[in-house]
Amino acid sequence: MTDIIHFHDVSHRYPGGHDVLTHVSFSVKQGEMVFLTGASGAGKSTILRLIALLARATRGEVLMQGRNLRQLKPREIPAYRQRLGLVFQDFNLLNDRTVFDNVALPLIIRGHSYRDVGRQVRAALDQVDLLDKEKVHPLFLSGGEQQRVGIARAVVTKPELLLADEPTGNLDPQMAQEVMRIFARFNEVGVSVLVATHAIDLIKAMPYRIVHLEHGRISMRTPIGAHHLGDTQHG
Amino acid sequence: MAKAEAGDLRPGWLSRLAEEHARVFFFSLGKLWQNPVGALLTALVIGITLALPAGLHVLIGNVDKLSYSWEGAAQSSLFLKDSVTEERGRDLAREIEARPGVARTGYISRQQALDEFRKLSGFGDALDLLGDNPLPAVITVTPLRKQTREQVAALTDELAHLPEVDRAKLDQKWLERLYAILDFLQRGVAVVAALLGIAVIITVGNTIRLDIQARREEIVVMKLIGAPDSFIRRPFLYTGFWYGLSGSVVALLFVLAGLAALTEPVRNLAGLYESDFSLAGPSFLAVLEMFGAGILLGWLGAFLTVSRQLGKIEPR
Ligand SMILES: Nc1ncnc2c1ncn2[C@@H]1O[C@H](COP(=O)(O)OP(=O)(O)O)[C@@H](O)[C@H]1O
Ligand SMILES: [Mg+2]
């Protein structure tokens, strides 16, 4: 089966800077959940940005289900992004709209009918256990609840790949565990998930593969099927 | 999972697009409602800008209408041959007055013409040097009011062929001059309207630019979750539509108020000239045109601005 994401010898530098990624190669299998770890500044966000086409890799190739992202024309990018579900550290919710309207947005962008929207939004809110909060504005919610709204918005379109960048960065440990469990639940029903985090302690007990970055290079990866880090060292 | 969705997207896309447009239609109106004072001020500025050319247009239309009612007052002058005696001249004037289509006639003898010319020209005694009076006697013919321009011209032509008449002249110079002036003014209004149209585009554009800046984060989030530019642009285009529409309403109110203020003085003035002329309001078509222009300009101002501003906001 084709990898959902494949990085082939990718190097990247932002305009005027040095290389923040050097010769990065890795892949995420279809239906797999992978953690991208590393210290702050290691290049985790950059990798997610290259996948979401918020930046274009300066060298090397990024493939999504075998399709080289370099071939995508600018006007094809929105449709491409609609195939992803993005979760952010600072939630990126629209605070002047209700929880329902926030979660509905990706569906409305895709032109779903109102009946459809209502049904799918409630299904997504149910999965993150926020069904009773649909009429509330995000700022009245706790951090953990806001992030669950963010996750509901990311999964409501049933994306092929869920990308999360430090999703627990602004949450207390208990909330953080809950959020990671939610990702695991989505992965169990077949969604491919790539989570960037520096919270090693939070994930080391979880049975998922880890790709570890140091200064823009992959310094360590656990083999597929390895269920925890064991005695390997990490930063 | 995604596969099942794809099939779901096909049927009824048109009704869904209509649904989406209806949603944005009210959403953008609601956004304006959140800042009613700002929206009202913008509508007011646009209204004033639109009212000026619209009002001028209506006024010119009225002068045009007035000139039609004057057209009947056009006179023709029949210059009589020198051989025609004064007595015969006066008889001829009476005969012509009896013709259908003629309201009245007047006879100006050679001597009267000379005296009048002396008075008006200021040449005075210098004319005595000519010895003989060079001016012909004239019969002035005033057609009935209801006569059209063509009918008056035909009558004049006919009278020109009378044996006593040397030459006939339809005295419409001043009307032609009026038409020329009206034409000029109309062009002037068109130029003013074009300039003010650009002003409306700039006004709406600037308002929407501020709006976009205030909603920058929202736009970034939308781009991140895959909204195409057309989707992000849509509410702003509708905002431009609302500005154009509300500005047109304001402009219409201004024009009607201006006409109402002028109605009484114009009626009084017309009364002095024994005319039943009264100011006409803008026609339905003119109102429609004004609204069309207002909405189009509002939309255009929004479109140009959003297209420019969206390109500047990351991610692209
Ligand atoms: N937009 C940018 N322009 C220039 N440099 C950047 C930009 N974004 C990130 N960087 C740099 O790239 C490196 C990697 O950053 P990032 O991918 O955000 O790391 P991480 O997410 O692992 O903390 C850092 O040194 C950071 O300063
Ligand atoms: Mg980061």
Image (tube, helix red, strand yellow):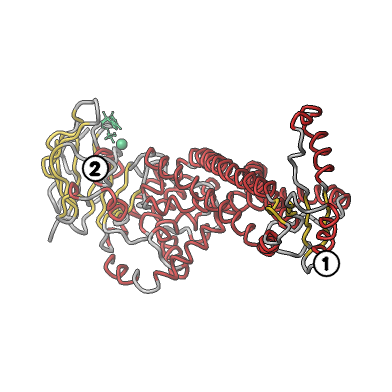
Q: Nearer the viewer, residue B106 or B177?
A: B106
What's the chain of the residue with tag 1? B
- Residue B288 picture quarter: bottom right
Q: Quadrant of ligand 1?
A: top left
Asked if one can make out residue B113 in the rendered structure from this viewpoint, the answer is yes
Q: What residue appears at the point 52 percent right and 57 percent down from the top-left corner?
A: A133
Looking at the rendered structure, the kind of residue marked 1 is Ala
Q: Is residue A209 left or right of residue A130?
A: left
Badge 2 sits on which subunit? A
Q: Residue at x 82, y 39 (%)?
A: B116
Give residue A233's position: percent from left, percent from top. Answer: 17, 35
Which corner quadrant holds the C terminus of chain B? top left
Q: Residues within 10 Å of mark 1 (few under 14, many from 20)?
A: few
Whether residue A157 sits left or right of residue B146 in the image: it is left
Horizontally, residue A22 falls left or right of residue B271, namely: left
Q: Name the residue carrying label 1.
A: B98
